[in-house]
Image (tube, rainbow, N blue to C red):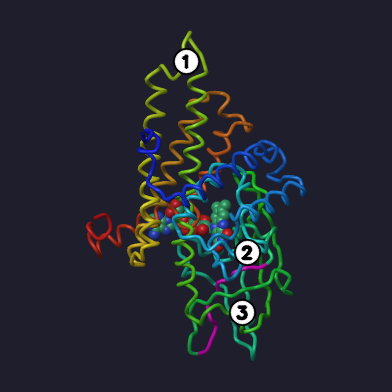
Amino acid sequence: MTSVATVTAYPMSDEEREVQERARRFVDEELIPHEAEAEMNGGRLSEELRRRHHHMAIELGLYAMNMPKELGGGGMPTFQQVLVSEQIGRVTNALGWSIRGERHECYAITEEGAGSDVDAIASIARRDGDDYVLSGTKMHVTSYNTADYLFFQAKIADGPNAGAHAMFFVDKDTPGVRLVREPAYMHTYADSHAVVAFDDVRVPAANLIGAEGDGLGFTYEWFRYERLMIAARCCGAAERLLDEATSFAKERVQFGRPIIDNQSIAHMLADSLTELWAARLMTYELSRNIDRGLEVKIQHAQCSMVKLYASEMAGRVADRAVQIFGGRGYMRENVAERFYRELRVDRIWEGTSEIQRNIVADQLAKRGVRALAG
Ligand SMILES: Cc1cc2nc3c(=O)[nH]c(=O)nc-3n(C[C@H](O)[C@H](O)[C@H](O)COP(=O)(O)OP(=O)(O)OC[C@H]3O[C@@H](n4cnc5c(N)ncnc54)[C@H](O)[C@@H]3O)c2cc1C
């Protein structure tokens, strides 16, 4: 007889379930036990542990999962990448970032005058013989301290494509790439978010990715991918918070009974579970449809919808979890406290909630309800 759990679980092939379980075991056994230690140590773990996690991620086939197999990556379909990202989202302090490839990248797009409005960037790329000379200052460059290379977005300075966006590949040790400062942020991650200056950085023309004018297209492609993966990680975070808050509410006794016996506590958990299920179904269905070849414009709107909904859902779940844990929920050793801070940025990076709503509303006006949610 089929068990109730099998019937209610989201339908998946044996291979997909196995990938999910493999990622779950890695997170439960190798990463979660080190969260509190990382929190108290500026997000850092010992070099030995860091190397162990990285090697294990490679051995388990969980690293560089979006890279084609021919290039040494995992070559996973989008749905399987979502399953892995969701598990990675269950751990705090970005310990799950150990699944990145052997050489790390970082993205230098945002500037002081250009955040939501990417087209306002002032960085320029000037062609000089067989080279380009890059200049500008970027901020919030995530993982600059651990990266080997950067993606740098600029506008072409002159010539027939003057003003067009272009994306460059820049090795971090190229002369002229200069760390300005590494400000402190709300979460406790080992990866910094740096301000980086490019002082006449000379790179070969071969470092231009695609053609002059392709820059924004690459950025939008990355946004679509990362918005979906943020949604997946937020679902994972909400699952973990619900697991932990439910266990606590069943065990914690006040006034002679477990606090879950109070309707006000039980309803917070019920709302959280309901919203998690909705966000998860949206995220799973979209990733399956991307694998089936969903039209890019629809992907663009739906990636905004899942990022918007899942990040706001996870924020609400974290807030309720802190409340359910009471004073313990305000302690840094508690998972709810860490997620309460960490999940806040998911409503800001890769496009704020306001920008996601603008994209969705724009697509709604152009295409109608049935195209986007039919
Ligand atoms: C921790 C962290 C890491 C980051 N990592 C990177 C990175 O690696 N690389 C990178 O290039 N960038 C990175 N960013 C930058 C991030 O993508 C931007 O912060 C984000 O896009 C918002 O830009 P902004 O901060 O300049 O806010 P602004 O664009 O100044 O917006 C401020 C407020 O105005 C609102 N607003 C702006 N325009 C509109 C509008 N048209 N309609 C309604 N509301 C609007 C916004 O929603 C927001 O509430 C990171 C940011 C953070 C916090």
Q: Say whether residue 128 is left or right of residue 325.
A: right
Q: Sequence order check: which comes first, mark 1 or mark 2? A: 2
19 shown above or below 202: above
**Residue bearing the label numbered 3:** 207
Which class describes the residues within 10 Å of circle 3: few (<14), some (14-19), or many (20+)? some
Q: Which numbered disc flags the more N-terminal residue, 3 or 1?
A: 3
Overall secondary structure of the magenta stretch? strand
Work out whether mark 2 precedes mark 3 in sequence or the reverse, and give the earlier one: 2
To which quarter of the image does residue 67 belong? bottom right
Instruction: Give the labeled residue for mark 2.
Output: 105
**In screen coordinates, is 312 left or right of 202?**
left
Q: Total marks drawn? A: 3
Q: Residue 167 appears at what percent x and percent y?
A: 55, 74
- Mark 1 lies on a secondary structure that is strand
- Residue 15: mark in rendering: none
Q: Residue at x 48, y 69 (%)?
A: 120
Query: Ligand 1 within 8 A of label 1's CB?
Result: no
* Residue 198 placement (x, y as % from top left): 66, 71
**Tag 2: Cα neighbours inside 10 Å, few (<14), some, or many (≥20)?**
many
Depth check: 128 or 65 in front?
65
Q: Which residue is mark 1?
A: 258
For this view, does 72 lie left or right of residue 266? right
Foreground residue among 293 and 166: 293
Instruction: Answer yes or no: is residue 174 visible.
Output: yes
Residue at figure coordinates x 63%, y 61% from the top left: 101
Residue shown at 57%/34% (left/top)? 335
- Spot occupied by residue 310 in the image (x, y as percentages of width and height): 42, 46
* Secondary structure at numbered mark 2: strand
Queried on whether the Cβ of the residue with tag 2 lies below 8 angstroms from ligand 1, the answer reads no
